[in-house]
Image: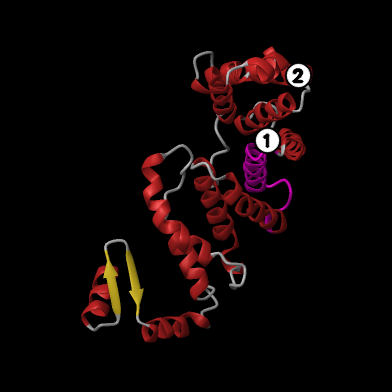
Amino acid sequence: MFTEVTGVLRRRGMARIAPDSMQVHRLAAALLRAWTHEDEESGGWATIVVRLLRGAVPGDPWDNPPSWPDWRALLPHVLAATDTSRPLEPAGEDVTWLLDTAATYLHTRGEPGAARPLFERALTDRRRMLGEDHPHTLTSANNFAIDLWALGEHERARQLHEDTLSRRRRVLGEDHPHTLTSACYLAIDLWALGEHERARQLDEDTLTRRRRVLGEDHPVGRVQGVATLPVICGPWVSMSAPANLMRTLSSAAAGCSGRTTPTP
């Protein structure tokens, strides 16, 4: 149906169709906006665009290069569609999902500064809509804290990871995979702030729990074994390790099981 509609628009000179984009004549665009403006069930044209984009973008760009070309093409549309000037309340959770996932794309591409406002807005909106303890809110809190760590804001990252860990322990339980992810990241924050003994204790407890829950040979447990190295070695690693080793350790830290999986 979509192909037929775009074909008609192109033949009548109402749209320019490219392999990865479509530019609609302003008259056709005005008609589309008018037809959907009063549609309370759909929430209007702005909401429809948000929902179409959520269905179009790849779900998890984290450390997933094959998804990046699609994200590169669609990111400007995501940013425009989720602009705060638009009436997006009916699609609130779709908006926060797009913000969090777009921020993940930017972060994993090495742009934590560009990702920061998107992560922060997703967290603020989820707290308002879902509450402090909702799993989706805690996912946003975890991801924002990871971004803060990458930007060197280790104290603020620690505070946010500590709060997220406390809430996940209460909501999900001590041994839930997301709880253990938060514990791993908090240990890395503590190490970065010089609290090496506390970091070691937390990381050893997390590794023990993961081995019991996931098994000795699970990839996450093996990654945490590497991520624990700076915690065990303490200041010696931070002062003496070559730069390439520190980059490896930082990557391992980011693989505490990676970021929390995006919300469905």
> Quarter-wise, where is residue 31 in the image?
bottom left
Q: Which quadrant of the figure has residue 12?
A: bottom left
- The circle drawn on residue 163 is none
Query: Looking at the image, which residue is at 46% across and 81% down?
Result: 33
Dot label at residue 172 = 1
Q: Is residue 171 above or below residue 228?
A: below
SS at circle 2: helix
Q: Above or below — where is 78 with respect to 69?
A: below
- Please state which amino acid type lies under the numbered disc 2: His
Image point (52%, 52%), residue name? 102
Say if 97 sits above or below 201 in the image: below
Q: Residue at x 74, y 21 (%)?
A: 199
- Residue 100's spot in the image, x, y percent? 57, 50
Percent coordinates x, y for residue 87 in the rendering: 60, 73
- Reading the image, the residue beneath label 2 is 196
- Given this view, does label 1 or label 2 mark the residue nearer the observer? 2
Residue 176, picture quadrant: top right
Amino acid type indicated by mark 1: Leu
Q: Is residue 13 magenta?
A: no
Horizontal side, residue 95 vs residue 51: left or right: right
Q: Secondary structure at mark 1?
A: loop
Report the colour scheme: secondary structure
Q: Residues within 10 Å of mark 2 (few under 14, many from 20)?
A: many
Q: Is residue 144 magenta?
A: yes
Q: Which residues are magenta?
A: 129-152
* Residue 231 x %, y %: 68, 18
The one of 256 and 154 positioned closer to us in this rendering: 154
Query: Of 126 and 27, which appears nearest the observer?
Result: 27
Q: Main secondary structure of the magenta part?
A: helix
Of mark 1 and mark 2, the one earlier in the sequence is 1
